[in-house]
Amino acid sequence: MSASTFTSEPETSAAPELDESLDAMLQDLGEMGDTFRANSAARFQAMLPRMITRVLGEGDAARQALADGGFVMNEATVVLRLNPDTDQVEIFCDVGVPDPHGLERAYRAALELNLCRTYPGVVFGVHPESGRMVATTAISSVIALDDQVCINALEMLTLHVRQLRASRTLPLLDEEPAFA
């Protein structure tokens, strides 16, 4: 190898028009992403009432779910939202309040569930404000904005939570769902 291979002088672009072309492409991609995210938000806002009506039927329960942002499905409280930063539809499902005398055991069990992917695609955590255990999953908005895909994801998540509660893997206080 020659000594010139290790020079610290910055390389200059041999083609400034290539740099300009790449900058223009990156700007176009950024604008396309902004448009896609705006369209995702509009489609999510249109899908949510349809999906909630399919799950809860028409009436007070559906109106309350839209107002509160959460509802009960399969004996579990769920909340859906579109995360504009990741363009993912995020689904949160309340698992319950960990027993104060078993917090370490509950947190360890949740970490083991995450590590072992006991429930593939589901992540367990603690809500930062309420201290409640939560199961969550996320789906690309490209596919999640279909009503049935969201309903299937809700079914999967709520049934996993029911199984987890029944297994007593997590020491939880016995209580009714938050939106019952």
Image: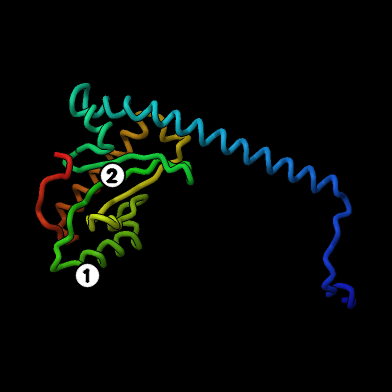
Q: Going 30% across and 46% down the picture, which residue do you hit?
A: 92
Q: Locate the N terminus and report the quarter of the image it occupies.
A: bottom right
Q: Locate the C terminus and report the quarter of the image it occupies.
A: top left
Where, by quadrant of the figure, is residue 103 drawn? Answer: bottom left
Q: Going 16% across and 67% down the picture, which residue do you hit?
A: 102
Q: Secondary structure at mark 1?
A: helix
Q: Amino acid at mark 2?
A: Leu
Q: Is residue 138 above or below residue 145?
A: below
Specify few, some or many for label 2: CA neighbours under 10 Å numbering under 14, 14-19, or 20 or more: many
Q: Going 22% across and 21% down the picture, which residue do you hit?
A: 58
Residue 85 appears left or right of 151: right
Residue 65 position in % (x across, y down): 24, 33
- Say which label, 2 or 1, has the lower sequence index: 1
Q: Amino acid at mark 1?
A: Glu
Where, by quadrant of the figure, is residue 25 drawn? Answer: top right
Q: Which residue is mark 1?
A: 104
Residue 157 position in % (x across, y down): 28, 44
Residue 132 position in % (x across, y down): 22, 55
Q: Which residue is mark 2?
A: 157
Q: Nearer the viewer, residue 64 or 161?
A: 64
